[in-house]
């Protein structure tokens, strides 16, 4: 008899439990946990280093937490992608010492728009990548603006938008290819177009 691969622990390692059939994460076990821990440490260290360098240059640093949330949106079912993005943003808020929940809501808003791209744009090449990053940055900042308006806060100003968003978008677009490699190593590869049809 052949080996059964379509059960709970299918070829992706998690089957329909956990992150769902779209998740293509490494197999369960210590290697997977170690990779995830190393990825989170790398995320915190590289984001901190880029933020220091960008602050000294007077520009916005690439948002690696945003790219992590986008990567999760491409690897998880939508119902789990939103809470995962919120969790990544909450971690960013806790590490950054800013307004608690601001980045969490921003990344959830970004992933909500990325999920629309994932659903309606069939290409998995450069067009989809560029569109995902642009839409994610727009979704994050639209959420920031909505929260600032709702809280009657002057947290978001026109000058901030004009000086921050262009350099943030450009830096995040340039960082995407290298960071996608780190995400693929730490979290797992992005599913291809054929896997999305299953």
Image: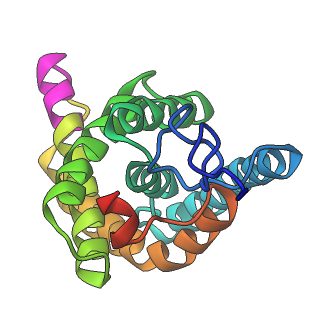
**Residue at position x 63%, y 55% in the image:** 187
**Image position of 33 with respect to 190: above or below:** above
Q: Is residue 104 magenta?
A: no
Q: From which residue to which does the magenta span run?
A: 144-153
Q: Position of residue 105 (x, y in %)?
A: 33, 30
Q: Quadrant of residue 46?
A: bottom right
Is 34 on the left or on the right of 185, as rendered? right
The reply to whether residue 160 is visible in this rendering is no
Quarter of the image with the C terminus in it: bottom left
From the image, which quarter does the N terminus lie in? bottom right
Q: Relative to residue 93, is residue 164 drawn left or right?
A: left
Q: Is residue 136 above or below residue 28?
A: below
Specify the quadrant of the image occupied by residue 167: bottom left
Q: Position of residue 194 (x, y in %)?
A: 35, 70
x and y percentages locating residue 148 in the rendered image: 19, 27
Residue 140: % across, % down: 27, 45
At 50% across and 71% down in the image, what residue appears? 57
The residue positioned farthest toward the front in the image shown? 1
Tell which of 167 and 84 is nearer to you.
84
At 14% from the left edge and 30% from the top edge, which residue is drawn? Answer: 146
**Of the pair 174 and 159, the residue shown nearer to us:** 174
């Amino acid at each position: 008899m052949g080996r059964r691969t379509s059960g709970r622990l299918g070829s992706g390692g998690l089957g329909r439990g956990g992150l769902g059939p779209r998740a293509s994460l490494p197999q369960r076990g210590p290697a997977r946990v170690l990779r995830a821990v190393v990825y989170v440490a790398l995320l915190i260290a590289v984001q901190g280093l880029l933020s220091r360098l960008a602050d000294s240059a007077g520009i916005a640093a690439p948002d690696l937490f945003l790219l992590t949330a986008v990567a999760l949106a491409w690897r998880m079912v939508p119902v789990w992608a939103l809470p995962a993005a919120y969790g990544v943003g909450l971690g960013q808020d806790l590490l950054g010492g800013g307004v608690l929940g601001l980045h969490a809501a921003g990344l959830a808003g970004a992933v909500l728009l990325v999920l629309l791209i994932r659903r309606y744009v069939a290409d998995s090449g450069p067009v989809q990548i560029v569109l995902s990053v642009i839409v994610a940055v727009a979704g994050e900042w639209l959420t920031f603006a909505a929260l600032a308006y709702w809280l009657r806060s002057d947290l978001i100003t026109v000058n901030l938008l004009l000086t921050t968003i262009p350099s943030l978008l450009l830096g995040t677009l340039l960082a995407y290819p290298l960071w996608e490699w780190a995400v693929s190593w730490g979290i797992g590869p992005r599913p291809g177009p054929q896997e999305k049809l299953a």
